[in-house]
Image (cartoon, rainbow, N blue to C red):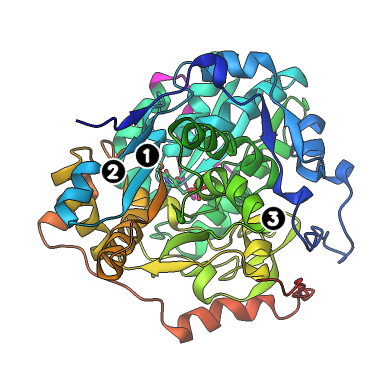
Amino acid sequence: MEQIKFMLNESDIPRQWYNLAADLPTPLLPPLGPDGNPVSPDMLAPVFPMNLIEQEVSAERWIDIPEEILNILYRWRPTPLRRAVYLEEFLGTPAKIYFKDESVSPPGSHKPNTAVAQAWYNKQFGIERLTTETGAGQWGSALAFACKLIGLECKVFMVRISFDQKPFRKMMMGAWGANCVASPSSETNAGRKVLEKMPDTPGSLGIAISEAIEQAVTDKSGKTRYSLGSVLNHVLLHQTIIGLEAKKQFEMIGVKQPDIVIGCAGGGSNFAGLSFPFVADKINGANIRIVPVEPTACPTMTRAPFVYDFGDTACTTPLLAMHSLGHSFIPPPIHAGGLRYHGMAPLVCQAIVEGLLEPRAYHQLQSYEAALTWAGTEGFIPAPETSQALAAVIEEAKNAKEEGKEKVILFNYSGHGLMDLTGYDAYLSGKLTDYELPDEEMDKYLKDLESLPKAEVRKSGKW
Ligand SMILES: Cc1ncc(COP(=O)(O)O)c(C=O)c1O
């Protein structure tokens, strides 16, 4: 058997994160305050600690990873780069399919890469408690894990539908000492308002974010801050360790570069983490196709306009320039809970505007079919979010077969699905259906944005 697991030593771990903001040919549009003017870093201070705000606005290409953070990450990092030879054989494809296995972290996904960093910077800043939202529970469990190791209290608002569908992640959060409640909850003004209007709502990430921010900024002790698991620049930054490791692993085995890089995208963090170091290569002339994948039920990148919109339902965040389905968008309750966010990371969106990325959407059923093909060949059971990426991987591998080309495909195996088995159960018993967001539904949510400042589409025209 040829080698199919490519490991780095602890001493090979990247010691700096990569910041795409330094290399984008057209700079990001700034976040705006309610008055339509750019927000200054100190306006974010009630929500985030200043050391993370500095990263959020940084234009430095490389940012050092503190040794104490690496000391925690060594529990599972560097993660293996693996080759999916069993899937390749099953598909009869000449493509070589590589994946970064982010499912090996204690909570089971890529999310702790930033959870650990965020908890550590908050602790350094004197913060004692973090609040956050979670969709599928991956992020909530990652932050609970990080807070436990670093010594912070952790409060998680979990989107109602996932809270009911995925009880095991809630228990994991409990095991790591966090307090997890269903959102919308009656603990916050934002939650109570939604419950009054829609008592049976499945909830959304936008609502849960509003609740978590409200609890952080209303804590009079000043010792609580909010932590976000995706979307923001500093979150994507922390995830770039994935792509930087992958580059070292490719170098080690003599693969010059991948032809295609694929990742699923909810808020954009695992996709960005794997792909941004390769986006940098593409900016510098490399011929790489880079594909973020989303569900047809929540088609932010493939159908939503590039606009200024709030990151949450209660309009408490600054306005971000991004593709957005509208902050009041309530996504249908598909099982890929982590891909149900109305917006997308501004860095990912600006790269889309530039033409550096080729976003795609897949139906839920095709994703589950891909997940079962994976489970029946590679053996592992992927997270429903990861399965969206797998649908694209399998399509690309089949294209390579038709074209007779030995393409190198790299994708992010963002998490395992062992806590998401209710989705598999629903699929296997024929209860799942496909859903494509109707135009009228999208237009309804986008109406809310008409009075907001417009986002200028700026691009270099190189791609
Ligand atoms: C396993 C997994 N993959 C992907 C995602 C999507 O998030 P992001 O786009 O920030 O990587 C999530 C979110 O919860 C997740 O749990």
Mark closest to the chain's N terminus, 3 or 2 = 3
The yes-or-no answer for disc 2 within 8 Å of ligand 1 is no
Magenta-tinted stretch: 175-188
Identified by mark 3, the residue type is Asn
Q: How many marks?
A: 3
Residue highlighted by disc 3: 284
Secondary element type, mark 2? loop
Cα distance between the residues tagged 1 and 3: 30 Å
Q: Using residue 393 as the reference point, say whether residue 257 is left or right of it.
A: right
In the depicted structure, whether residue 233 falls above or below residue 437: above
Q: Which of the two discs, 3 and 2, sits closer to the camera?
A: 3
Any part of residue 424 in sight: no
Instruction: Please provide percent x and percent y for residue 115.
Output: 57, 30
Closer to the camera, 160 or 378? Answer: 378
Residue highlighted by disc 1: 415
Secondary element type, mark 1? loop
The yes-or-no answer for disc 1 within 8 Å of ligand 1 is yes
In the depicted structure, whether residue 64 falls above or below residue 259: above
Identified by mark 2, the residue type is Pro
Cα distance between the residues tagged 1 and 2: 6 Å
Closer to the camera, 397 or 33? Answer: 397
User: Local crowd at mark 3 within 10 Å, few (<14), some, or many (≥20)?
Assistant: few
Secondary element type, mark 3? loop
User: Residue 149 has which mark?
Assistant: none
Cα distance between the residues tagged 3 and 2: 33 Å
Residue highlighted by disc 2: 382
Q: Which residue does the image show at 74% across and 24% down from the upper left?
A: 223
Instruction: Please provide percent x and percent y for residue 450.
Output: 71, 81
In the depicted structure, whether residue 402 falls above or below residue 414: below
Quadrant occupied by the N terminus: top left
